[in-house]
Image: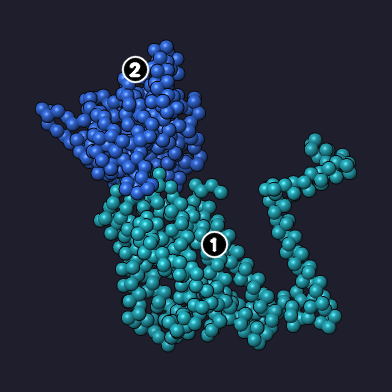
Chain colours: A cyan, B blue
Amino acid sequence: MPENEDQKSEGPTAQASRCSEWLKRCLTIRDQPSQFERFSAGGFCIVLIVLVWGFVTAGPNEERIVGSYTLPSIKEAVDSFPRLWFERALARSTVASLMRVLGGFILAAAIAVPMGVVAACFPRVNAFFQPLSVFSRNIPVAALIPLTLIWFGLGETQKVMFIFIAAIGFIFFDTVNSVNGVSSRFLDTSYTLGAKSVPKKGAIRAGFIGLIYGVILAVIVGVISSLDNPSLTTAEVIQSPGVWGAFAAGLIGGFIIWFPIQSHQSIQKVMFPLALPNVVNSLRLLFGLAFGYIMLAEVLNANHGLGHIINMSQRNGPREHIYLILIIISLLAFTIDRVVFWLQKRWFPYVQS
Amino acid sequence: MSNPNSSLNEPAPPIVQFAGVTKTYDAGTSKAFTAIRDVNFVVEDRPEHGEFIGILGPSGCGKSTILRLIAGLSPQHPPTEGSVKVWGEDVTGPGADRGMVFQDYTSFSNRTVLDNVAFGLECQGVSKSDRYEQAIDWIAKVGLDPDHDPQKYPHQLSGGMKQRVAIARTLILHPKIILMDEPFGALDPVTRHNMQDLLVGLWRDLEATVFFITHDVREAVYLGDRVFILSNSPGTILEEAVVPTPDRLARDMQREPDFLAHVDRISTRIESLEEGKD
């Protein structure tokens, strides 16, 4: 092939000119690198960190630039992994942390997304929630720890509710913005095509969603109360007033926040679906944020959890675990981010990136 | 609002009637702005023949305001003064009986061409098989490929194709009034001629009354039965010119001397308006 021959006969001058061309591209603003260059650059960053880490912790402890008390060597960190896995129950802790964040976050999204849609479509509702929205986005998140401890006790409820309160204001605000971003010409178009209000159909659909909300909320409350009181039997949990209260609250609350959306064709068929790709995208970004809050949620009285392991390791050692957990948390958050990103592309094939 | 089925003895009410219509935004404040002032016109019902009315005027004279008042869209609706009547009844809000095609592409990006065209029927609660069948018909009628185009999303379409979708999804509802706000404004000249011919062909079958805003005098003269010329802001109707009906292809008819004479006369009028002499 002619191309291959070209490459073989390429002299040192040609190589030098290609090299300088590449350097020139590196210095061009917004020049897009190839996939290979992207991965190489990222890989180079990781290699560099590992090299620096290895260099400052090389040799026996007394001769190191940084002592093992401050920073363990790579080998020490890797060697401590079996202890982390078996003694500290890493898998169980990861699941526990994930469930807490997911529980609080999904609960917050289930309320704040439809409320945000309603608020964006009816600006008076938005004006009503404005003080709460501003307040919840500006409070220092750490200050919620003592408050949630007072309100929800020491159990799992506190951990889930902490994430819930920390996330709900941001989800609401982002949803309002996403729906406001839908041009009103789509609304006008839908009106001239006969989009109207359908209160009966809307009530049926909102009732159905309320039913789903009620069941899910009852299950969440049931699971949490059986986690906090392992002595309860399943029958006792199902019959408890808390579970039934949760069902009623989910049913009524779900109906109220979904009815305005489902009873207007122009919201249900136009505004909401058009805003949805942006809503999901901001949920993905906010989930990363919420996952970072897990440490705060698990500082007190957690039996399992990644944050709990960090606390234990800081007090009782081995300190290697702190580094491992930090890496695991970021890998986990990154994986979830990529999975949701992939789902977004499948759900919304019409969105151009 | 529905077309009142009046008995044959009574004269049918005019299709659209503007009586002393003025629209002022932020009335009573320092920001008050009058878009149109004292607009009067009547479009009579001509059985089995809808009228095609071109609306011309200098930029910002309130052409869109007139259209949106007929459509009943806020914030133009309701008028500050005067009355806007459609079939003898005051306009109370938007409805599918007055279809509208906008200049901006308003295809719903989350819906395929098929679901875009079927949107109005979906709102009416027509069953899926029925509305898809009708939508496929209309996709073919507006010159799209009924085999391949229905499953495409709007971002895969050119500007001309998007406007074909917009026309199809409006006409599938058989509105008796069609409001077009510079629908071909963003299209290249060749596509524009094709779309004009498409529109003329479809409109004859529908017997609907069309209001068509444009900046292009040739387009207005070609398409229109009548051309309304609006004054500078606040707009009012200066002249209702009767022009030849489009009975030949756009590119042929638009080269004839009689046609060009009309275009010249109206262009001069508009230019003098733009310069503020009128």
- Tag 2 secondary structure: loop
Residue A2 shown left or right of residue A214 in the figure: right
Kindly identify the amino acid type of the residue bearing the numbered disc 1. Leu
**Based on the displayed image, in which of its 4 quarters is residue B59 positioned?**
top left
Determine the chain carrying the residue at label 1. A
Looking at the figure, which quarter contains the C terminus of chain B? top left
Image spot of residue B87 (x, y percent): 21, 34
Residue that lies at the very extreme toward the left in this rendered image: B9
Image spot of residue A137 (x, y percent): 48, 68
Residue at 36%, 19% in the rendered image:
B246
Identify which residue, A241 or A53, lies in the foreground. A53
Residue A68 in sight from this viewpoint:
yes
Residue labelled with disc 2: B244
Identify which residue, B63 or B122, lies in the foreground. B63
The disc at residue A285 is 1
Residue B7 shown left or right of residue A59 in the figure: left
**Based on the displayed image, in which of its 4 quarters is residue B255 positioned?**
top left
